Amino acid sequence: MRILTLPACLVVMVAPALHAQAAPAAQPTALHWGPAPAVFPAGARLAVLSGDPTKAGPFMIELAMPAGYKFPPHFHPTTEMVTVKKGTFLVGMGDTFDAAKTKAMQVGDSGSIPANAHHFAMTKVATFVTVSAMGPFAMTYVNPADDPQKAAAKH
């Protein structure tokens, strides 16, 4: 019986240390939210989850949009991967905004939008999406008059 006691004691003493090494590091509990950049229509909030959207390389953001939020037709120079975290994200393809041509993405749905593909989007309820892409992030509006930065410059 003594022969089993020593190994059993060692296991009991070492197990907490091994568990601590194997446990994943604690994830941050609060994201740092702020207004989305001026290229987005007013009202959205953004948090960077990883990377830096202003620099070359992969990044991931979370975008919070209020009910009734609309993205006019636009495109990006890189492919985007979008995952719905809360609400419903309605996405359509083309050069003209047409709510009837959108397809609903529900919580848990993911999809990709190819580089340079003209698309538009909207929400009916408060919606959160995660977007992954390669930086630097850029968004070009199909109709330059839809760009909120140009509208702000006129005022």
Image: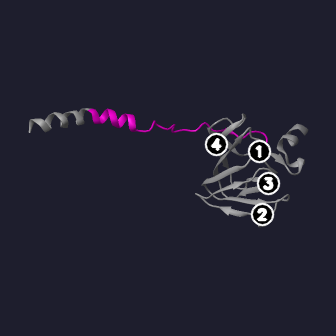
Q: How many marks?
A: 4
Q: Which mark is residue 117?
A: 3
Mark 4 or mark 1, earlier in chain? 1
Pointer 2: what residue?
99
Residue 64 position (above or below residue 17): below
Position of 73 with respect to 130 (left or right) is: right
| Crowdedness near tag 4: few (<14), some (14–19) or many (≥20) residues, C-alpha within 10 Å | many
| Residue located 65% across and 59% down the image | 88
Using the image as rendered, state which of residue 9 and residue 104 is in the foreground.
Answer: 9
Query: x, y percentage for residue 47?
Result: 64, 40
Q: Amino acid at mark 3?
A: Ala
Mark 3 or mark 2, earlier in chain? 2
Position of 16 with respect to 132 (left or right) is: left
Q: Amino acid at mark 1?
A: Phe
Q: Of tags 4 and 3, which is closer to the observer?
A: 3
Mark 4 or mark 2, earlier in chain? 4
Q: Are marks 3 and 1 in contact (CB under 8 Å)?
A: no
Query: x, y percentage for residue 155?
Result: 89, 38
Q: Which residues are magenta?
A: 14-41
Q: Of tags 3 and 1, which is closer to the observer?
A: 3
Q: Amino acid at mark 2?
A: Ala
